[in-house]
Amino acid sequence: MKKVLIANRGEIALRIMKTCHEMGIETVAIYSDADQQLPFVKNATVAHRIGEAPVIKSYLQMDKILEIAEKEHVDAIHPGYGFLSENATFAKAIAQTSMVFIGPSPSIISLMGDKVKARQTMIEAGVPVVPGSNEGIQTIEEACTLAAEYGYPVMLKASGGGGGIGMICCNSEEELEKAFHATKTRAKTYFGNDEVFIEKFIPNARHIEVQIFGDQHGNIVHLFERDCSIQRRNQKVIEETPSPFLSNETREKICHAAKKAAEYVHYTNAGTIEFIVDEEENFYFLEMNTRLQVEHAITEMITNTDLVRWQILVARGERLPLTQEDILSLGHSIEFRVYAEDPVKFFPSPGKIEEYTLPENVPNVRIDNGYEVGTTVTPFYDPMIAKIIVNGNSRKETIETAKDYLNQIVIKGIKTNIPLFQRIMNEESFLKGEYTTKYLN
């Protein structure tokens, strides 16, 4: 594998480039008109314009991406996360060429991308799932009947997609009736699939995910869990590992369940099994993400691994670099997603970055950055501009390092959510590790 096209942008494109360059692999970047001046374009071996700023005219243009890849004679395509990373059609199109898709098989992406089918598969695998419907719901009458059976509140979810777009909590039949058709319409628009289903809402829950990895030789491992409970509108803001909430017994059980899920579907490459965990530490399967996660860096910190390197090795047909017994969890790590947004109202804050100081080479702090001074954050894409990853020997040490580093950051020209991080790092519920998914909502 000598040349890889990165079908993404910003910090994740740079992150993938870093590992590729270390491995002696050339990189091909694609960029929209809005991103022409960003660092990832300059850091690639070669870069190609893909189209206008809107994603539908640029980063989602499968045919154009494949055309550029073939023109550059690349050996593989890395999708990063978001955009086409979990698009089975894209993965299948690559599989029909001489190029390699750096990710799981199209069939696995398709299976686990449909949340109803994923639920059914996990039930077959013996992995606990949240009580809910195991088939798509067609009518509001059916939805109300099921919701009454499970008891309110319930989560109404789109089968074809997740995140804040694809789910809504309904506290009553009236709310469910209002949300039903709107959710189906929104699901059709964003995911091309209007199928919805219902799950029982778990109060005071934790969002815990487990990093899994598989190779083409049948080897599957987990790399421990991440606590992603600090969310805003069902979107993650701060993640940490290990979870301060889980007992060692539950940690072992949840990691075993994730590995069991991956084994059942014969998973290859990087993936994540997401769980919801209640107050008594009962855990239930939520979904499987068939890609690298935004928060993969904290796992790399505590396991001393390079997961992008692992992805490339597996895509080349090689075995996983480590066995389960070799993978150790050492220390603690916290990731902060730095967004260009108002830290109080949470509205996006696009604009030109006039001053940008994220101190580099600070012990125990890693920066996965996507912007630099003079560049512009546009309204066309997710407003995340960087990730700050802090690690230490203990959670307390990591928090103290994070506090100090956050105070050193200077960003002008746009608003960011760094003041929010600074407040959280001093709040008692966070310091005690007692937060849930409702911490910011």
Image (tube, rainbow, N blue to C red):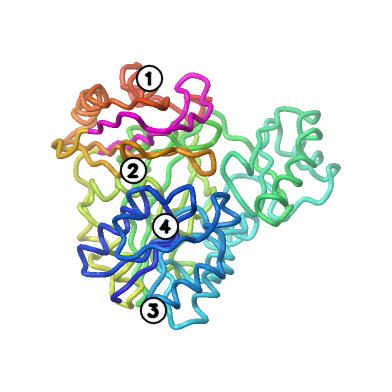
Gap in Å between the C-alphas at discs 3 and 1?
53 Å
- Dot 3 and dot 4 residues touching (CB under 8 Å): no
| Image mark for residue 280 | none
Q: Is residue 24 magenta?
A: no
Say which residue label 2 marks.
249
SS for callout 3: loop
**Image point (38%, 19%), residue name:** 429
Front residue of this view, candidates 420 and 317: 420
Residue 436 in picture, x, y percent from top left:
46, 28
Q: Nearer the N terminus, badge 1 or badge 4?
A: 4
Q: Nearer the viewer, mark 2 or mark 3?
A: 3
Gap in Å between the C-alphas at discs 2 and 4?
33 Å
Say which residue label 1 marks.
429
Q: Nearer the viewer, mark 3 or mark 1?
A: 3
The answer to whether residue 119 is left or right of residue 382 is right
Residue type, mark 2 in image: Glu
**Image point (65%, 43%), residue name:** 199
Pointer 1 local density, CA inside 10 Å: few below 14, some 14–19, many at least 20: few
